[in-house]
Amino acid sequence: MRFDRKLLKNLDWQLWLAMLLISVVGVIVLRSASAGVMPRNPLYYTKRQILWVIMGNVMIAASLYFDYRLLTKLIKPLYLLNLTLLAAVLVFGQERGGAQRWVSIAGFPLQPSEFAKIFIIIVLAYYLEKHEQIRNWPDLVKAGIVVAVPMLLILIQPDLGTALVFVAIFMGMLYAAGTELKYLASLIGMGILASPLMWKFILKDYQKMRLLVFLDPEAPQYRAFGGYHVTQSLIAVGSGRLFGRGYMQGTQNIRNFLPAQHTDFIFSVLAEEFGFVGALLVIGLFVFMLQRMLSIALDAKDVFGSLMVVGVIALTLFQLFINIGMTVSVMPVTGIPLPLLTSGGSSYLSYCLAIALVLNVGMRRQKILF
Amino acid sequence: MEKDFFEKRVNHISVAVFFLAIVLVSRLGYVQLVKGNYYLVRAESNSSRKMVIDAPRGDIESSDGVTLVSSRPAYVVSYLVPPEEAQREQAIPILATILAEYGVSEESIRQAIVDNVWRRYQPIRLAVDVSDETVFQIDERRMDLPGVVVERQAVRDYRYGNLACYLIGGLGAITPNKQEEYEAAGYRSDATVGIFGLENAFENVDPALSLRGQDGYRLVEVDNYQRLVAAVSETPPVAGNKMVLTIDSELQIAAEQAILDIVEKLNDKDARYKQKPNKAAAVVLNVKTGEILAWASYPEFDPGNWAKSSNLWTSNIPLNAYPVGSTFKPLMSLLALTEGIVTPTEKFYCPGYYQVGNTKKYCANRSGHGHLTLEEGIKVSCNVVYYDIAQRLVSKYGRAEAMDKIGDMVKLLQFGSEIPLDFATGYLRAPGIIPTSENFRRVYNYTPYPGEVWDVAIGQGIVEFTPLQMAAYTSLLANGGYHYQPHVVQKIVDPSGNVSFQVEPKLLAEVDLDPAALGIVRNGMHEVTLPARPGGPGNGSAYYLFTYDPVMRDGQKVEVAAKTGSAEVGPGISPHSWFIGYAPFDDPEIAVAVFVGHGRWGATAGVPVGHAIMKAYFEGLPEVETVSP
């Protein structure tokens, strides 16, 4: 296969640039958050994150060489790899904070559930391309099983948040794929019917509490289940006011009142130190990225490409809304990372894969300009 | 899949993107722009703490410039209670172990946290004045003790231990019944305040007078482990005013030591005296000003740890009333002479007892003093002379009226009027009992018989006064009738060295005494410290020490006037020992009253103490104890 340089004219540089810009903001905010987390080695997380940003973007660049259609030939191996990794987590996984999410690969701690999101986007896009517009129940059930197997493995970890991302991806892609509304409505109806049972039999008490925290984060019963975290986050975000308290000046961050400020609550640091203006800028960049992705989805040369992009959109939108919503107490505490900003290799690199897919689809759209 | 249909659905997703973005932005706008100031205040209160720096209390100095009580820096362990339970659970057991020797336990820490919930974010004081060793232990385990803060604070330094402890009084936490009063005056609820004595009397008063200074504050920043990360600002405390007392340190030391010596000496195996001295007092007044030059009370207590002593409020002995015994005789003599029922040259006859009808009472000297004048009666403390005087009063006025005449003289000499004191808050003060027929009837429910009037005439029966009252009475006899208000505060000096308050002598009453009668009484009291004269009835009752170890000043003997007393308190019970006296005889400067409970005879306990005090005043201490600061 020869790489056609003309393809680069179709590359969505704006999307990539916005993504890079958010990554840089992430590194800058992370530097400040590290001063609170690891005051004795404040560059530890920052250096690692810079490494991920470089690795991730080199990976994106490299991926542009390959046609994404190649993936259609690798669906089964990809799916099996995904399940193997998720199973490996359950067998060999390292426990952190009460859940097994990490597995060590060649000495690197890897969080397979992050990559599972991307794999499932690819697999589901392939499946839906073959079964264009699901028009019967068996197709729907099969599609459901494709998603449900990895999702269950993740639920067992337990990682409710990531499992919910799967639901969002599934619903978003089904909707874009033109699934008749009655099927979607049935799915939603089933979800509604199943939720009391889930509540009663599946969810553990702490998970229920975390789902309810946003109702009143300062209530004493939620204190130990993230209520304290959300309260401190609200104080951080609120005290940032319009222009923020200044870089590395946020007391909630620097004095460590804000928990997990380099991961789940990185946005709170941004809002505390750069204020409403800073928060708006980042949300604006994300919205811009989403708009670029939407236009790529529309222009894609095939359904497989379109749906993959829609899957990435669903993933981005869901994680963005849940994570930021959590920091300002409109969403439950779920531990879902904020794409590009939350520090960590698995999260960043897996999202780079997602962006690589989108850029690839955009670059290889129908209208090639000569 | 039709292109248009797909486009429609993707457009729906686009709408969702905008909708969710608007939700987030509106919420951020509300939290950051509408409620921003509220959260900013909360962020600041999260990370800043106000640590109180106690103002050093004012020093208390003796009139001769010796610092009796000062303040010194000490370590105080406070706890900034961390919000996370896990952090508390980690720290509390360790803290309780380290601070166990200061009476801190896990329960007491938890209780303190509960008690201070309403002051959350403010540090709770757990232990004051901890040792360097303790500070070191806390420092070693700093990482395990989030929220524990060690600070330097001033605490009371009792340089002379319990010297003058009853005057100085003690400090402690605000008692619940005073909470409102102190809070209204702007005190912190965990403030340390004077509970009794001078510490209390000059606590919540005009700041120009108060020993208390103004507390300082240190604003600090803490992290979520409540570790201090930075000091923001500091308002230094202003020290309290210095108080200069009228107390002479040497005299005070001498008085307390003399009491301790006599108590130790009498704590013997002598089976005749079942009760050993258990309480004692000495009060020394300047007869020209009312200044209290020494105030001793036994048993003493540790002012730094007074809470361990029980019943302190009743144990300031100079304020408790006891039967006064023969120290009452100068007053009776004055009465007899003023009434004209005795002439100075008239001779009484003492065969060792006195009898009228069936009533017969004995003199202390059963073999009798023979013929003696009133003046000699004072010298040898002859009971018969006073029984006779009492009987003459009974004959002249009737038995009830006779006792009232004595009562009138007692009142004239100001026993009946309360003496205002500048330091005595927190102590129970006995008013004493004035011998009147009414008081007698109140106690016994009948009109006194002549024999009971005789008893009163020798200071027995319903004649009870405090050592302080006896000192004031002695002073009155010495200065010819000027009743000055006894006081212990001489002046108050503010931190910049200006005298903010100076106490002037205050005359409470001027008593009109017949100079001739007073002269005879004084001569009699002078004779008490002198040996027998040829043809006289015997040695003065306090002659021994004052003759063989005379009080000297500049190589000259200082003449001392005195009276001893042995107050019977019941059959077979060791009597209370009294001594009152003043000196120099011709131009009195000081008046002394000594009381030793169950100290046996006046000469056994009262005289040695009074003698030691006189010696200390006129000669100074042979070797002054000094404590370097």
Image: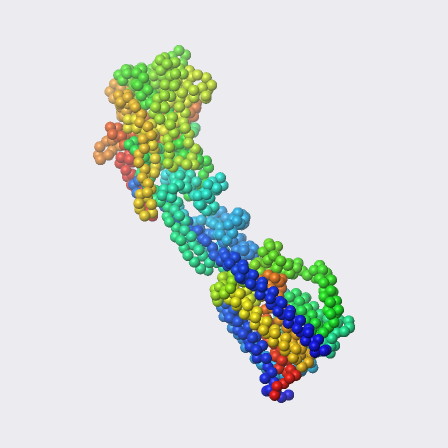
Determine whether B613 is above or below B445 in the image. below
- Seen from the viewer's position, the closer of residues A365 and A203 is A365
**Extreme residue toward the left, this view:** B555
Seen in the image, is B477 located left or right of residue A345?
left
Task: Residue at 46%, 17% (x, y): give it.
Answer: B446
Q: Which quarter of the figure has residue A206?
A: bottom right
Task: Residue at 25%, 31% (x, y): give it.
Answer: B558
Determine whether B11 is above or below B599 in the image. below
Q: Which quarter of the rendering shows the N terminus of chain B? A: bottom right
Task: Residue at 49%, 52% (x, y): give it.
Answer: B122
Residue A3 location (% of width, % of height): 61, 87
Residue B93 location (% of width, % of height): 53, 53
Determine whether B355 is above or below B480 in the image. above
Seen in the image, is B411 located left or right of residue B78?
left
- Seen from the viewer's position, the closer of residues B156 and A58 is A58
Task: Residue at 32%, 37% (x, y): give it.
Answer: B503
